[in-house]
Image (spheres, rainbow, N blue to C red):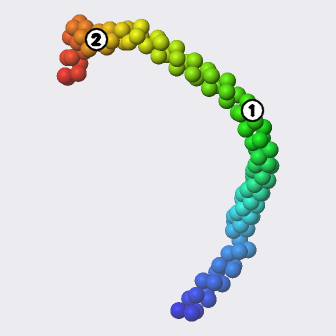
Amino acid sequence: MAAGAAAAGAGLLAGCSDPYIQRTMEHDRQTTRFALDSYAEREARCSANLRSTSAMIPEQWQDDMETLPRNLAGAREFFREDVEDWPRRDAAAREEIRRQLEGDLTTILWTLPRLAF
């Protein structure tokens, strides 16, 4: 058994000088190098992006605090108008619901056979 393992090991070492094996190993080295370089570049960009984003946080917070009162006033106005307009829309909504539930027999007669078969 040891002789078989030694022969296999010798065969593997001999295979390392094979041009095909050499090309494959070089390709693997290049691929690994490319992957590691890409990862390093991405990490460097992420660090720079994090610093840039961190610098923007106080500016954005200040902007949000300045626009908040205006946005709240606008939201209050929107909801006030929505509540005031509800009776007019409610009547129209009820009519549309009634119309939809009543249906149109010509449409039903056309659609029903298609659904059944």
* Residue 70 to residue 106: above or below: below
Q: CA distance from mark 2 to mark 1?
A: 47 Å
Question: Which of the labelled discs sits on residue 97, or is there none?
Answer: none
Tag 2, which secondary structure? helix
Asked whether 101 or 66 is in front, the reply is 66
Q: Residues within 10 Å of mark 2 (few under 14, many from 20)?
A: few
Which one is nearer the viewer's eye here, 97 or 63?
63
- Asked if 26 appears above or below 58 in the picture, the reply is below
Residue 21's spot in the image, x, y percent?
A: 69, 68
Return the residue found at the far bottom.
2
Q: Which residue is mark 2?
A: 98
Q: Residue at x 25, y 11 (%)?
A: 103
Q: Out of 9 and 115, give the one closest to the viewer.
A: 115
The residue at 74%/64% (across/down) is 29
Residue found at x 58% / y 87%:
5
Q: Secondary structure at mark 1?
A: helix
Q: Left or right: 81 with respect to 105?
A: right
Residue 34 appears in the figure? no
Q: Are marks 2 and 1 in contact (CB under 8 Å)?
A: no
Q: Quadrant of residue 26?
A: bottom right
Question: Residue at the spot x=53%, y=92% of the render?
Answer: 1
At which x and y percent is residue 33?
76, 61
Tell which circle, 2 or 1, labels the residue nearer the N-terminal end.
1
Residue 114 appears in the picture as rendered: yes
Amino acid residing under circle 2: Arg
Which-is-in-front pick, marks 2 and 1? 1
Label 1 crowd (10 A; few <14 / some 14-19 / many >=20): few
Viewport quadrant of the C terminus: top left
Q: Amino acid at mark 1?
A: Asp
What residue is shown with label 1?
A: 63
**At which x and y percent is residue 114?**
23, 18
